[in-house]
Amino acid sequence: MNADVPQGTKLGPILFLAMINDLDVKPHATDIWKFVDDISTSENITKGSNSKFQFCIDTINSWASCNLMKLNPQKCEELRIYFLRESPDLSPLLIDGHALE
């Protein structure tokens, strides 16, 4: 299958789902959701443990490169939710050296 997926067609979403079917970031991310043209991942970090999420993003980025695709850091976002009184000191997430918003 060619890496190009036609946009704006009825077949495009199905072809994209077929392409991302082999993407697996476990055990690095707690969950992964594959949408029609989007991927979301999550990680729960317990108090005192370190985040492995950058490794997860690097895995997705490597997978995209192997499939002749490129992640767009301007279209990728990060949402952090804290249940502690003080927010933990976490490094920013990067895609090819670009920090996510």
Image (cartoon, helix red, strand yellow):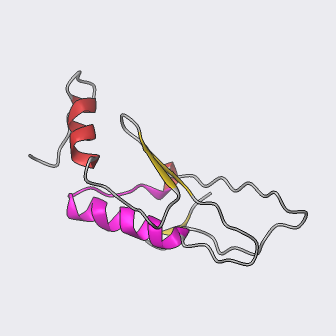
Query: Is the residue 58 above or below the residue 7 in the image?
Result: below
Residue 70 x, y percent position in the rendering: 32, 58
Residue 46 x, y percent position in the rendering: 71, 68
Q: At x 29% / y 63%, what residue is drawn?
A: 63
Given residues 72 and 16, the one toward you in this image is 16
Given residues 83 and 2, the one toward you in this image is 83
Considering the image in quadrants, where does the C terminus appear?
bottom right
Q: Main secondary structure of the magenta part?
A: helix
Query: Is the residue 39 above or below the residue 69 in the image?
Result: above
Q: At x 57% / y 61%, what residue is drawn?
A: 100
> For residue 56: magenta?
yes
> For residue 13: magenta?
no
Give the image quarter of residue 8.
Answer: top left
Query: Is the residue 98 above or below the residue 16 in the image?
Result: below
Give the image quarter of residue 86.
Answer: bottom right
The tally of labels here is 0
97 left or right, relative to 99: left
Q: At x 78% / y 58%, what residue is drawn?
A: 82
67 left or right, relative to 28: left
Residue 35 x, y percent position in the rendering: 40, 37
Range of the magenta residues?
53-73
Given residues 43 and 60, the one toward you in this image is 43
Residue 17 x, y percent position in the rendering: 27, 39
Is residue 23 something that shows in the picture? yes
